[in-house]
Image: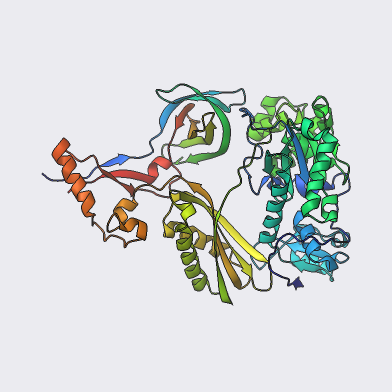
Amino acid sequence: MARSRASAQSVPTRQGRGWAHNHSTDNDWLNTAAADTSWASGPGAGTVFQPASARTSTESRQALCLWLPTFELRLELVRSPELDSTSVALLSDGESTRRTVWQVSERAHEAGVRPGQLVSQAVSLCTSLTLLEPDPAHYDAAVDTMLEVLTELTPVIEPAGRGRVFLGMDGLDRLFGSSNHQIDRALRLLFQVFPAPLVAATRAGLAPGKFGAWVAAASARSGRPVLIPEAHLGSFLTECPIGSLPVDPLVIQRLERLGVHTLGELRRFPEPALVAQFGEDGRNALAWSTAHRIDPVRPWHRPHPIRVSLEFSNPVGLTGTLHSALDRLVERALTRTARRGRSVTGVRIGAHLEGGGSWFVETVLHEPTSDRERIAAPLRAKMAIVPPPRAVETLLLEFTEFGVQSTQTQLFDRKTEGSRATGGLDFNEGEVPVSIRDAVKELKLRIGYAPLYRVVEVDPWSRIPERRHALLSVDF
Amino acid sequence: MNYRPHLKPLRTPKSVVVRTDNQGDPVHVRLPGKPARRIAVVRERWRIDDEWWRQAISRDYLTVVLDDGTVLTLYHDLLIDEWYVQHG
């Protein structure tokens, strides 16, 4: 049964008694996390394993990886400690039919429930299984808390999905002593914000570069961090499974079918052969496995999103009402002072749901804009694909990424210049403000022609940037 | 005099000189009329393969940050092995 619970809240501090499926066997970590390249998603995703060809002084070569496996499920068990001794599974996000299991507790695992199984399969294997709806707002709040507290140790912090973070440790010896002391300090900081069992489950790995640190953390045991000196990194990686490589899972599958199971075995192949078979992934895989590629930790620039919300007096499930509320929220967010002078490029909509839990979808806008409709339309499309699973109590909107100020199309879109700031009415087609007419006339008198153009859409959704817009000459 | 509106292209790519490392990643870029600058960070990369049915387009796009903080969108035209900078 799906269990209802309180809506999203800040990170709880109560201690749970027992713990979720603990990936303690030798290869479990590989099957559950490393083979899933989505571990490189989340805040800062996409920058996690960028090419290391150019370094800036703010980067750190020595990396500490802190990893809390099944972070989300552990947070749920901290919130509901009475579930510690039961079989629990966290559902994946997505549509209501054919939902799958995302994370499972140890007891559920013993009963045969596995991540990725359909709910119907999981329930038939374990009839006492308690299913929990995911609460991304709660998990993200916990991640924020974790990142905030770790900044006391080092400013060079790079999150890599929930429950996984890389810390840049260059130059900390004089402040905090040996590497072991530095790791102790990092864990002590986590104890300040998380309950003991959650921190106790943390795996820590210290090595040159993020890949080495991640592999070290994944092979570490709770309370026993793995430290790899630079001279031993190559030999340490030799026996590591190829599933630890952050490359396309299909590449891993093909390598395994070819009988390549460890990084040591991968090294035997010449680079041209790997590139011919797997392209860039092949080249990267070889560079990581030979420890020739060291990805420094790059400081993550914490976004300062603009957040607005709308609370409904009664939970709302009607799409039309949600769309109207979305329009109002976009308008409110656009008028925020913090947004002035910037356009919006990333936006996220979420909701606190009736009966607990939360829901989020986000989108990257095709191009920077501060136009309400251009922001709301892709969100409505996303809501149609992944609608809120239950009625909505509070609708939330976040502008997460910003670009430069929008193009000057607004100059042509308002009745008067002054009305641009106050949100004046749109022009009728072909109508041009007096100020523009005057400017054109003056330019023609002075230089004989009007070098004035209006940006017009040609093929706004084209993947080729130069096909999207053009300049149309303005004259009267 | 009759007014005849005309269109001008926007965001047309401009040729740049890029030096790459042995992995093919850009290390330095020289914009037209400016000194070469070091690429500090590659923020994002994506690929566009399109219009194969007429004149094929195959581009490897990168958003890079130069050592002076400038953010540029570069692409590598994979068909003719030339680098370009493109705004927007």
Q: Is residue A389 visible?
A: no
Q: Is residue A391 visible?
A: yes
How many circles with numbers are drawn on the protein?
A: 0
* Image height of A423 relative to A47, above or below: below
Residue A419 falls left or right of residue A159: left
**Residue A181 coordinates in the image, percent (x, y):** 84, 37
Outermost residue, left side: B1
Residue B9 placement: quadrant = top left
For the N terminus of chain A, give its image quadrant: bottom right
Residue A219 falls left or right of residue A133: right
**Residue A126 coordinates in the image, percent (x, y):** 84, 67
Residue A225 falls left or right of residue A474: right
What residue is at 77 percent from the left and 57 percent from the top?
Answer: A115
Residue A280 placement: quadrant = top right
What residue is at 78 percent from the left and 30 percent from the top?
Answer: A174
**Residue A201 coordinates in the image, percent (x, y):** 84, 50
